[in-house]
Image: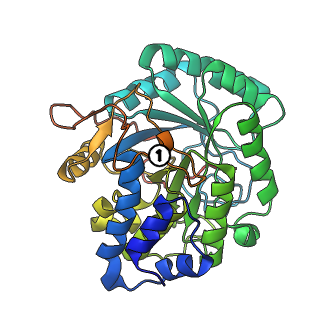
Amino acid sequence: MRSYDSLADAALAGELLSREDAKAVLASPDADLLALMHAAFRVRRAAFGTTVQLYYLKNAKSGLCPEDCRYCSQGRDSSANIDKYPMLSADRLLAGAADAAAAGAKTYCIVASGRGPTNREVKHVADVAARIKQEHGLHICACLGLLKEGQAEVLKAGGVDRINHNLNTGRGNHDEVVTTHTYDDRLATLKKARQAGLELCSGLIVGMGESSDDLIDAALELRELQAESVPINFLHAIDGTMFEKRRELDPRYCLKVLALYRFLLPTAELRVAGGREVNLRSLQPLALYAANSLFVSDYLTTAGQAASEDHKMIEDLGFEVVLSGVESDVGRSDGAAPGGGAPDGANRPATASRSGQEAGAGGVRESAGAAAAAACGA
């Protein structure tokens, strides 16, 4: 394998790493971890400087899902002890947006369980999105499952900025994770969103029995899609789910995955997402040398680290939180740097240091004691 710095040089030049080099990153010695993260940080810094974007997730509709996703506490085969409820009212979703703003989040994620939304649910989210934009100026991401024709356009018209629909794993591993929809079904929803002019948020869950090739294949698919945002979830094995006994991750491997995805998607917004507290543990801060965003407060049915602790972690790193309502110069995942490839934080978004800001505790837990990975359901 080439040196880690040479891999960073290649990524910065828009070159695609070979599959051999990508596998070598995942298999790199633990003793090389700091050198690997330094190289990943060079790529991260070129596109995003030392800024961090915070996301706040609202579980707008919980459980009641007919899909058989084996990682998910909300699916039909799960016996996990979670709250189950239909789509939240506009007032509840607006209250969540206020919590997101108080927690310093830039993006508010409205997530609904189920195979896909009804037209009535789509209109409801679109109407609420318009009010959130007016009252809080937040960037809005909607994760509603498989979209039907015309639904993406309604969401776009209402003020939704981005659709989240995770690939979750590589094509070769998909049927080991879920059988009630196909990998191509997921791609179709992402393509509908793109055609409607929506940004794409799509990532994966690491730790579901995937091979190195599966991880690489998913990254290459996301690169082809030019997904603006890529959340990397680490499986939180939940009692009552089909994957309740899967615990195959360690913090060092999780960091290697993040470094690889930074090399392969040099200008994508890379988010360290669900399961970070459980799998990265004391090494969480190192994740932000590759990733440039994270979820603050809670996930879908799991409680996350307190927002105040996330802000302290970011401040201790000497990094800065992107302010709510300020659009970042989010790059593309096609290998080209934003703004024509300005290096080392040029054209950086407006930010504010955590110093002098108050972090809201932000976050009403919808499920005490129940848990699932923070990945889109269907």
Question: What residue sits 41% from the left and 24% below the top?
Answer: 325
Label 1 environment density (alpha carbons within 10 Å; few <14, some 14–19, many ≥20)? some
Q: Quick check: 354 above or below 372?
A: above
Q: Quick check: 169 above or below 295?
A: below
Nearer to us in this view, 311 or 326: 326
Q: Quick check: 117 above or below 302?
A: above
Asked where in the image residue 113 lies, by quadrant, the reply is top right
Where residue 157 appears, as percent x and y from the top left, is: 68, 19
Do we see residue 195 in this rendering? yes
Question: What residue sits 63% from the left and 31% below the top?
Answer: 87
Extreme residue toward the right, this view: 149
Secondary structure under tag 1 reads loop
In this picture, residue 71 sits left or right of residue 274: right
Where residue 102 appears, as percent x and y from the top left, is: 32, 28
Asked where in the image residue 217 lies, by quadrant, the reply is bottom right
Where residue 145 appears, as percent x and y from the top left, is: 70, 43
Q: Mark 1 = which residue? A: 367
Do we see residue 250 in this rendering? no
Question: Which amino acid, by three-letter code, is at mark 1?
Answer: Ser
Nearer to us in this view, 253 or 377: 253
Q: Quick check: 6 above or below 315?
A: below
